Image (tube, helix red, strand yellow):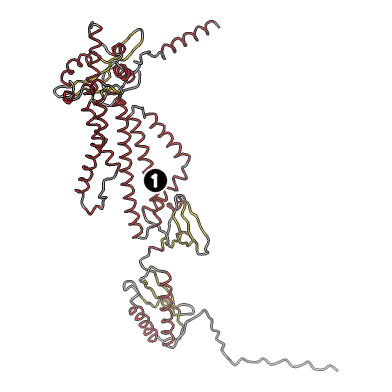
Amino acid sequence: MRILSALLLLVLSVWGQSITVDRLGRTTPRSSLLSFLKSARDGNYNKAIHYIQFSKQETEKEKLEIARQLLFVLDRGFVGNLDSVSAKPEGAADDGLPGDRETVGAVVGADQSSEVQMVRVMENGQQVWLLSSETAEMAPQLFPEFGFPLVEKYLPKAMLDIHILSMPLWVLVAILAAFPVAMAMAWGIAWLFLRLIPKKWEVAKRPSFPVVLFIGLLLHSIVSQFLGLPLLYRVWYTRVIIVLWLAAWVWAIFSIIGHLDLRVRGYLLRNHLSSTQAMLQLGRRLLQIFVILGAILIGLRSFGFDITAALAGLGIGGIAIAFAAQKTLENVFGGLSLLSDQSIRVGDSCQFGAVSATVEDIGLRATRFRTVQRSVLYIPNGQLAAMNIENLGQRDRILFRHTIGIKYGLSPEGLFHLLEDMRSLLEKDERIAPDGRRVRFLKLADSSLDIEMFAYVLTKDFQLFLQIQEEILLHVMEIVREHGTDFAFPSQTLYVEQANLPIPRSQDPPAPTA
């Protein structure tokens, strides 16, 4: 029991050490950098110096001055996304730097630039992240290069001394005033771009609000860097820009999808392919869902969230859904295959096996047929894609083929003229295809002289074919009657022969007895 208690205390002590959090928030590179910016922005430089690694024994006054200059340099010249800084205690593992180093951005000046790096050091028995000594030494060197904006020389002293939200009053006024200016410039840029687009593309002549807003915010973000927008506020400003940027891209992609959808719908209507509109609508919605999911994942990645787990979850969830809905997916892909191949369309008459039916609708799961008996038949698309289907609706012509039996008794010469008249009937009819037509004397059957009529009627409409077939058969009957014969039917002839047969004499009766 004592051994178990000792082990439990050991585990608790190790666990307690593993979850120890630095009271100043220096556990991760991101938390340490943001804590420095917040402390320095609040004017608490005594706390801000605890987030900097100093390379030598600077005095307390020198440390405070370095912290002030470093904040000024970061506010004026920092380039990078603070949300992309690692929020893990071990830092980023794929940046190619040693495990105790992390590059969080860069300071870019007019003449020189330098990377901003964090370093992991041991302090009071725990590992913490600090701004590296190289970054601290960079601040006094770049501070004179940035200096104060030239405009501050011409502003009233009150605009420089009064601070609102930890920034000079003139900076706040300039940022607010720059917004309508940026929007006006954005509208002008969008209007000029629309004028350069060819008229045949049929685009709108007035700039849309999302496009103008996106360009305006982009211009405003550029101006805000020159005005000296504090880096801490720039984090939230960048997040707003990213959200609006993603919204603009989603809106633009949705507009393209809608434009293509209208074009495809017009094509389908012109070519009588309205049955594919249901599948087209499904594809459009799936594409829109993928666009939204992609925008959300990109946004989370831009805000510094690790989306690896989310992608893995989507992959596992997709596999699970695929296994659970295997038959459903099989039918959906079967429907897509039918629509893409155009093997059957709504209104086509089809024959599979001994069943003849007309296609009424091609759905996501099954295809609906109307049989000759007027009953409704549903066949899953997965099975239908694997069946041998004879599509009668896609015929370019319809076969006319009949065997006509003529009674025996017609002379060979009379049969020859009968065949010539039947051939002439097909040749004069323009509704009969000239290739492949024939009229031939086939055989001497048991009760008829069999003649084959073979031709293709130039029509796709089965009802019209029946009408043409009826007219041809009636003309055939007239031709047969004109040649003095008739149609044969199964019959038998019994011949009786008369002959003289001998009649045997009857025997004499027996003599009477006495």
Relative to 272, say whether 119 is above or below.
Answer: above
- The percent position of residue 21, horizontal first and vertical second, equals 39, 14
- The residue positioned farthest toward the right in the image shown: 514
Relative to 497, say whether 344 is above or below.
Answer: above
Residue appearing at x 33%, y 30% in the figure: 301
- The percent position of residue 507, horizontal first and vertical second, equals 73, 91
**Residue 258 visible in the picture:** yes
Task: Name the element at disc 1.
Answer: helix
- Specify the amino acid type for callout 1: Arg
Image-quadrant location for residue 69:
top left
Camera-side residue of 216 and 343 = 216
- The percent position of residue 442, horizontal first and vertical second, equals 40, 76
Position of the C terminus, as image quadrant, is bottom right
Image-quadrant location for residue 484:
bottom left
Identify the residue under disc 1: 285
Residue appearing at x 41%, y 56% in the figure: 275
- The percent position of residue 56, horizontal first and vertical second, equals 22, 7
**Residue 354 visible in the picture:** no
Badge 1 density bin: few <14, some 14–19, many ≥20, Cα 10 Å = few
Image-quadrant location for residue 119:
top left
Position of the N terminus, as image quadrant, is top right
- The residue positioned farthest toward the left in the image shown: 111
Camera-side residue of 45 and 117 = 45
Q: Is residue 178 left or right of residue 387?
A: left
Q: Is residue 65 left or right of residue 2?
A: left
Residue appearing at x 23%, y 54% in the figure: 200
Relative to 377, say whether 224 is above or below.
Answer: above
